Amino acid sequence: MTLKESFEKAVADSKTISEKPDNETLLRLYSLYKQATEGNAPAEGPGNPFDIVGRAKHDAWQAINGMAADEAMQQYTDLVASLLKK
């Protein structure tokens, strides 16, 4: 199975995690997914200063700017696998 196929399977599997992960883990999943599928985060985050969730997501994604898509896919796949084992 290629890395892309493993990543796509992990994305599907992430929807079957029985126990909701904590917010830090959810932000990590989000940022890795975005980095793998879209590349670096835009410089500007949400325009609404009261969008706390949007700001947290943008900050998490921006924190991994420069990470290669393949690396993000692998880390995402590994993280989902570890969550499924819990």
Image (cartoon, rainbow, N blue to C red):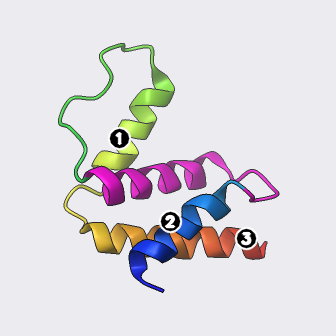
SS category of the residue bearing label 2? helix
Q: How many marks?
A: 3
Depth check: give the residue in front, 23 or 1.
Answer: 1
Q: Residue at x 61, y 68 (%)?
A: 80
Q: Which residue is mark 3?
A: 84
Q: Which mark is residue 59?
A: 1
Q: Residue at x 44, y 28 (%)?
A: 54
Q: Residue at x 57, y 67 (%)?
A: 10
60 drawn magenta: no
SS category of the residue bearing label 1? helix
**Cα distance in 3D space between marks 1 and 3:** 26 Å
* Label located before the other in sequence (2 or 1): 2
SS category of the residue bearing label 3? helix
Residue 2, by quadrant, is bottom left
What amino acid is at disc 3?
Leu
* Label located before the other in sequence (1 or 3): 1
Residue 86 position (above or below residue 61): below
Residue furthest bottom in the image: 1
Q: Residues within 10 Å of mark 2 (few under 14, many from 20)?
A: some
* Label located before the other in sequence (3 or 2): 2
Looking at the picture, how far across and down is residue 3, in whole percent?
41, 79
What amino acid is at disc 2?
Glu
Q: Which residue is mark 2?
A: 8
